[in-house]
Amino acid sequence: MKAMILAAGLGTRFKPWTDLHPKALALVNGRSLLERNLEYLRSFGIKDVIVNVHHFEEQIREAIIIHDGWGSNVTISDESDEVLETGGGLKKAAGYFDNGPFILMNADILTNLDLHTMIEFHKEKKPLATLAITNRLSSRYFLFDDGERLCGWRNTKTGEEKISIPGRKLYEKAFSGVHLISPEIFSLMHQQGKFSIIDVYLELAYAHPIRGFDHSGSKLVDVGRTESVAEAEKLFP
């Protein structure tokens, strides 16, 4: 199995670090987010990883070379001309993946989610994508039915809501930034350039089942803001 780590973002919520560095190289107990996530994937036997780069991309390239990929086989997807967001970045890297499902994850997520269990769930249910979710407070939620099938999305701060499958009782679940995706998704993406993978999911969910995998109780920190580092350092020595 292969994986992709999304590391191209500008990291505007992580200033002042991102004024001079990419967020993927931010340190948690002396080790970068990128190193930690490569190690996390490798603990489940996933050594072939593509990393997209844009913001201070040369620093990420240099770190990968210096540390020999921290033991992983790391390929770079170059978005130095334009950051393509999650969907566009994934589509640009489509040629990297083979015929099997693959992991997509954000560089600023730290978790001990059991990928083996999530992979077995994906093999059993055979959805287009499986999304790691938990019962936790957030301002943005995926909406699922009783069978954990994706039916929509909601922003509780703005009131914005997108419903893909109407007429069902819906449950709010917070997304953990880890996806397990079947390669068939590439033939269904009509979007070009810069776009969000979330918009792709919401468009396809009606005709192509997308499932949630609830891992509530696992360790999880979104290190998207500088104040999250202290929490991450408590949970991830």
Image (spheres, rainbow, N blue to C red):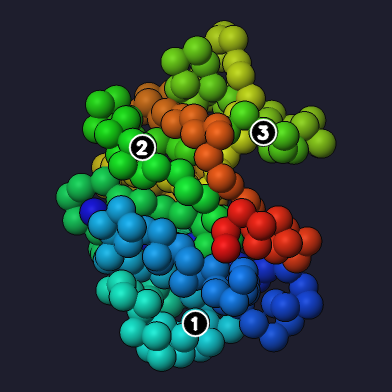
Q: Which residue is at a point 39% across and 85% down the rendered structure image?
A: 67
Q: Residues within 10 Å of mark 2 (few under 14, many from 20)?
A: many
Q: CA distance from mark 1 to mark 3?
A: 32 Å
Mark 2 element type: helix
Q: Which residue is at a point 51% across and 88% down the rendered structure image?
A: 58
The kind of residue on which mark 2 rests is Met
Name the residue that disc number 3 marks: 136
- Please name whichever residue, 207 or 223, is drawn nearer the observer in this view of the structure: 223
Q: Which residue is at a point 57% across and 63% down the rendered structure image?
A: 237
Whether residues under marks 2 and 1 lie with C-beta atoms below 8 angstroms apart, the answer is no
Relative placement, left or right, of 233 versus 204 is: right
Name the residue that disc number 1 marks: 60
Name the residue that disc number 2 marks: 118
Relative placement, left or right, of 11 versus 164 is: right
Image coordinates for residue 57, horizontal then vertical, percent: 52, 82
Relative placement, left or right, of 121 versus 166 is: left
Q: State which tag comes first along the sequence, 2 or 1.
A: 1
Relative placement, left or right, of 231 versus 192 is: right
